[in-house]
Image: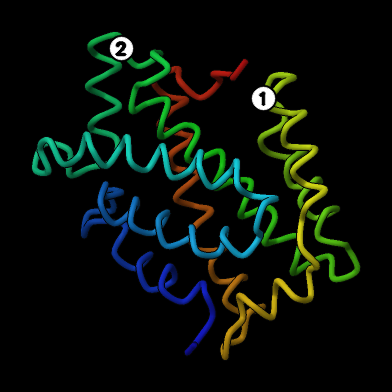
Amino acid sequence: MEGTVFAPALDGMKHVKSADGVILTKPFLDVCKLILPVIDKFGAAMALVKSDIGGNITRLENKYLTNPTKYEHLYSMVQEEVDAKTAKGSSSCTNGLLWLTRAMDFLVELFRNLIHHQDWAMSQACTDSYNKTLKQWHGWLASSSFTVAMKLAPDRTKFLEVVGGKGDVNSDIEKFCATFAPFLEENHKFLASVGMDGLKSS
């Protein structure tokens, strides 16, 4: 394999914003999809995260496909739900974007941990990033499931070898975190501006 597993996502991120700086729906979702093969390399430990991310991408993509022109900008479908007072529904696109962004926050934090804490085992890197991101939004059930799953985390050296391919994995992870994190921050700011950034799960 040429390059790292992150290479396609790094390329995709160049197209996430329009010329006037607005996050576009399809390119953003495409980048999220390109992270799924990275999550695959975690095996059973990330099965929950992967299905959650995949489900939310599908929900947003299905809405986008109903009218690609109308929903070209990522926040347009959220604004529509906010105006219609349907944004807080569990199957809303707003809820989908919120949880997709939170799951991506977790992954960015996890990748940062792998780079900045070379002495940490994978399970420690996972648990630390979970505590900093998703845990505050999860209820007891989700939190317990996650804690159990983290114990199945693969060996970090093997994982980095697998995702590294023939590329510079540390450099690509750094680039991915530096470029993708601001998009996630922008999502949170927009969701907060419409009063939707603080929803919790059961």
> Please, which residue is most extreme toward the right here?
119
Q: Secondary structure at mark 1?
A: loop
Left or right, 192 with respect to 91, comes to right
Q: How many other residues sit within 10 Å of disc 1, few (<14), some (14-19) or many (≥20)?
A: some
Q: Check whether the beta carbons of the residues at disc 1 and disc 2 lie within 8 A of each other.
A: no
Disc 2 secondary structure class = loop
The three-letter code of the residue at mark 1 reads His
The total number of labels drawn is 2
Q: Residue at x 65, y 25 (%)?
A: 137
* Nearer to us in this view, 161 or 93: 161
Q: In the rendered view of the protein, which quadrant contains the C terminus?
A: top right
Q: Which residue is mark 2?
A: 86
Above or below, comparing residue 41 to residue 186 in the picture? below
Up the image or down, 12 lies above or below 4; here it is: above
**Residue 98: x, y in percent?**
46, 31
Name the colour scheme: rainbow
How crowded pointer 2 is (Cα within 10 Å; few <14, some 14-19, many 20+) is rated as: some
Question: Which residue is pictured at 42% across the width and 25% down the height?
Answer: 95
**Dot 2 amino acid type:** Thr
Q: Give the mark nearest the N terminus, 1 or 2.
A: 2
Residue for badge 1? 138
* Residue 200 in picture, x, y percent from top left: 59, 19
Within the image, what quadrant is residue 186 found in? top left
Of residue 59 and residue 134, the one placed in the foreground of this image is 59
In the image, 107: left or right of 96?
right
- State which quadrant residue 165 falls in: bottom right
x, y percent for residue 160: 70, 75
Q: Residue at x 26, y 42 (%)?
A: 61
79 w.r.t. 109: above or below = above
Q: Residue at x 80, y 67 (%)?
A: 155
